[in-house]
Each structure stands twice: as structure tokens, then as C-alpha cells.
Image (spheres, coloured by chain):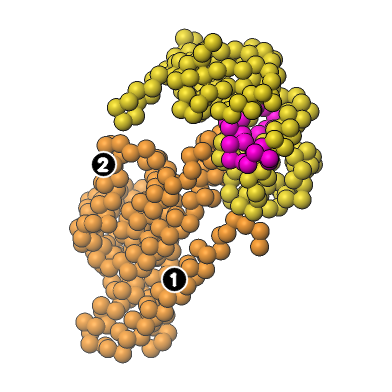
Amino acid sequence: MQSDAIVPLLLTLKVASLATIFASILGIVVGKMLGRRRSFTRDVAESLLTLPLVLPPTVLGYYLLVVLGREGFIGAWLMRTFGVSLIFTWQGAVIASAVAAFPLILRAARAAFSEVDMQLENAARSLGATESEVFFRVTLPLAWRGVLAGALLAFARAMGEFGATLMVAGSLPGRTQTLSLAIYDAVMAGDDARANTLVIISLITAVVLLIAAAQLLQRTRYSKP
Amino acid sequence: MTFSVAIEKKLRADRREFLLSMKFDSNTDVTVLYGTSGAGKTLTMQAIAGLIRPDAGRIAVDDRVLFDSAMSIEVPARKRHVGLVFQDYALFPHLTVSQNVGFAQKRGWRSQRLSNRETESILASVHLESFAHAYPSDLSGGQRQRVALARAIASRPRLLLLDEPFSALDSELRAKLRAELIEIRRRADIPMLVITHDASDVAAFGGKTVHVDNGSVIE
């Protein structure tokens, strides 16, 4: 009983972690590219990139199938070049979760970057820093709290991802069946004991993560101890 | 040492228009840009430092042209070697005093070593050696001002720009730091341009004074 509840938990953590890492890297890069100045084009771009958050996950799943499926332009290319398909794989689940979580980190990162005092970035420039040095030595270190908050939301979203994952990766026990899919599966099968165990595991994981996050976010005081 | 500034920039905000039209040069060690707030002093300083781009004109320090609209020359801020002391100091809050001062020395991905001899000696010159590992938030206004000055000097600038360096300090401290600044500048031998709206600064610094009002120099 316990051991087969561990499998979906580990799979969920693996999928959600990787999805958060990919979504974070992309979200930070795009958030930086969108910049702090607002303009019509930038706002339209941000709105389009936020779509995965507001669209029903099944719509997202449908589009991912269109793109990643055998007929899709990325799916067909992957098949031709590497002979692999992402459909019904845990890697496919990572992509579905990453796409669903991406808008959260993008919006958080862009907001966090634009809250950094521009004067500090200018000070760095006048001290000889290149634009990438300004970003890595001033902007990102000062914005990391907001970025991390976004990454946590992204992780939570990735952990709870259901609809898109189901459509792209299916619900194959031990392979693509994450916690949320396993809970649904258990309830549908009338296995209340298993559903209970999985729900409690989800709950504990979420609480542990929230406490860890609060600790992390608290630890930055720029002051002598 | 000489520098010359002749720039124009039109700014628009809330349907009001402001025309910055600055033209002055100097060949003294200390130049004071004096005028009321809103006269365009800070904009001029930002243009010299390369943080804003004038619509037209020319900026040169010694024989080095930093900006020339006619010849489409625009040296980026990081290559201008102009040291800035911001009005609100703009110290990096996430770095210690010695990391702030050593900022210009650390390049690329290398870790920010805590302190090297040069940073130490610059900190000593502004009497902050015992605060090397403190963060800006632990410091008083006067100490922050000294860190900002030390950080600018440590980047070995060819010209030092100070924007209202004492406006955030009380008058007693102002007089003390002013004397310190004059002494530090002389030892570092870097020409400087000071922005102020305070007539007592003008008297204390001597050198050349450029009066500014409503975006232009008045004779």
C-alpha cells in the first residue's frame, strides 16, 4: 500500500521539479526581455504568453498534442531526427506542466525585475558593468525573492497539473501517473483507502514545501547578524 | 584636465515640455553646477555619464569624445570612466561595504572576493575600514555617502560626478564631509563636477561655478 503510493509521489516531484526549472529559466529570460517599460506590443506579448494560465488545461493539452503529436511539427521532427515521441511519456508530462506553469513565473519575474531600483542598475553601468553583469550581479540578486515566489507558484501549479498532463502523457501507473492523476484513478476505481493515502501525501508535501519556502524567503536580511 | 558639454534634450511629461540646453566647459579641478532643483542639473549629469541620450550635441572629457550627435559617437556608460555619486547614494543593498567599493574591480563570473588590498586602502581613506563587512542598511547617512564616494573613486574614473552629495545630511555633518571630500579629491587627483542647490557648497568648493536655471546656463 505505502510503497505503491511512493511511486506517484516521486514521479510527481520529478516532473514538477523539472517543469519548474524549465519554466523558470524561460520565464526569467522572457521576463527580462519584456523589460520594465510598458508598451502596447509588450503587453500583447505578455497577454499571449499568459494564455496557458487562463485557457482550460484541456485546451492546452489539445494544443500540445497538435504540436507534439506524430503529425505535429515538433513531434514529427523529433520522430524523424531522434526516433522518439513525447506522447505518453513522463517527459511529455514535464512539458505539459512546464507550459502550464510558465505564465506564473513569467509574470512574477517581470514584476520583480521592474521593481528593482533603476538607479542601482545605472550605478553598476557607470562602474563598468556590461548588461549581463548588471543583470546577474544587481538585478537578479535583488529580484530573486519575487522570482522565487513565482517559482513556488509554478511548482505548485506543476504538482497539481491534471488536464493537460492527462491528454499528453496519459495516466499510466508507474510511468506517467502523477499524484493528482493517481487520486482520480483511485476514486474512480472506488479504492477509498488508496485515495486517502494519496491525498494525505499530497497535503504533507504541500505543507513541507510551504514551510521550506517561508524559511527561504525569510532568510534574506541585508544586514549584519 | 578639461571637459566640455554642449547638449540639447527635449523632455515631455504630463503635457509639459522641458528643454534642456546646456553649454559649458571647464578646465579646473572642481566645477560646481549650481541652480535650483528642477533646473536640469541631474539630467546634465546623467547625459555626461551616458545614462540618458541627448537629442543633439557633444560631450568631451579631455580629448576623448563621449558623445557627438553629428559624428554619431555614443560611448556606452560602462566605457565612459565617469564616477558617479548619486544623490541617494544608490549603494547595492545586497552587497557589503567592501563588495560595493570593489564592484568595479570584479569582472564577469568570478566570485566577489571579500576584500583586496586596494579596496582596503580606499576604505581606509574614507575612514570605513572597520565597516568593510557591514551592509549599507547598517550605516548612517554620512557613512553611506563615504561608501558611495569610495565606490566611485575605486573605479578609477577620469571625472567624478557628484549629485547633491550632501543634501541628505545635517549641516554639521555636511561641513565635515565637504572638507573630507575636498581632501580626498585632492589626494586621488580626479577632477570633479559637483551639482548643488546649496550656496554654501559653492563657496566651499571654489573652482568654477556654472549657474543653471530652467534648463540652460545663465551668465
Q: Secondary structure at mark 1?
A: helix
Whether residue B158 appears in magenta in the rendering, the answer is yes
The kind of residue on which mark 2 rests is Val
Q: Chain of mark 1?
A: A
Q: Is residue A206 above or below residue B178?
A: below
**Camera-side residue of A9 and B83:** B83
Residue visible at 29% across and 65% down in the picture: A165
Chain B representation colour: yellow
**Camera-side residue of B56 and A178:** B56
Point out the stretch of residues depicted in magenta: B151-174
Q: Which residue is mark 2?
A: A44
Tell me where residue B137 appears, x and y as whole percent: 61, 52
In the image: residue A208, left or right of residue B160:
left
Whether residue A10 appears in magenta in the rendering, the answer is no
Chain A representation colour: orange
Splitting the image into 4 quarters, where does residue B127 fall? top right
Residue visible at 66% across and 62% down in the picture: A225
